[in-house]
Image (cartoon, rainbow, N blue to C red):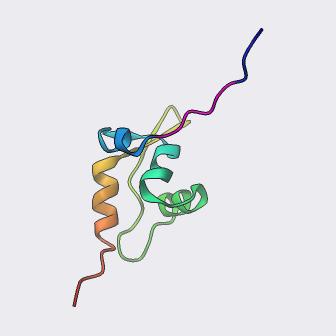
Amino acid sequence: MTTPKQKKTINVIEIQNKTWLSEKEAVVYTGFNRDQLRNYRNNGTKIAGTLPYVCIGGKFIRYNRNEVDKWLMKHRVPRE
């Protein structure tokens, strides 16, 4: 008897310790949905340009967590 595949829950604490994030992990980490993440990756924003990523073998997208943090910080709104 086979058991149905269980979806792996993405743990935020595990993500914070990783260097490279999958698209699903980047969605959890940033709070953006998948379409927003792809839009920022492909089209960027006026303030910070495109979201940095690597594409491996034309198929696998990975985000460097530190680069994502830097990109996000470019959008930081200064305190008054």
Q: Is residue 72 left or right of residue 28?
A: left
Q: Residue 71 sits in which quadrant?
A: bottom left
Characterize the magenta stretch by its predominant secondary structure: loop
Q: How many marks?
A: 0
Does residue 54 lie above or below 8 as drawn? below
Determine if the magenta segment contains residue 6: yes
Q: Residue at x 33, y 48 (%)?
A: 65
The C terminus, quarter of image? bottom left
Is 20 inside the magenta-drawn segment?
no
Q: If the image is split into quadrants, where does the N terminus sit?
A: top right
What is the x, y in percent for residue 54? 41, 43
Q: Residue at x 56, y 33 (%)?
A: 8
Q: Position of residue 41 (x, y in %)?
A: 48, 58
In the rendered image, the residue lying farthest to the right is 1
Relative depth, front residue between 68 and 45: 68
Q: Residue drawn at (64%, 28%), measured in percent from left and top?
A: 6
**Residue extending furthest toward the bottom:** 80
Q: Is residue 70 left or right of residue 2?
A: left
Position of 71 relative to 47 (above/below): above
* Rendered image quadrant of residue 34: bottom right
The residue that appears at 45% across and 49% down in the rendered structure is 26
On screen, residue 37 above or below 77 = above
Q: Position of residue 16 (x, y in %)?
A: 32, 45
Range covered by the magenta-colored residues: 5-10
- Residue 60 pos. (x, y %): 52, 36
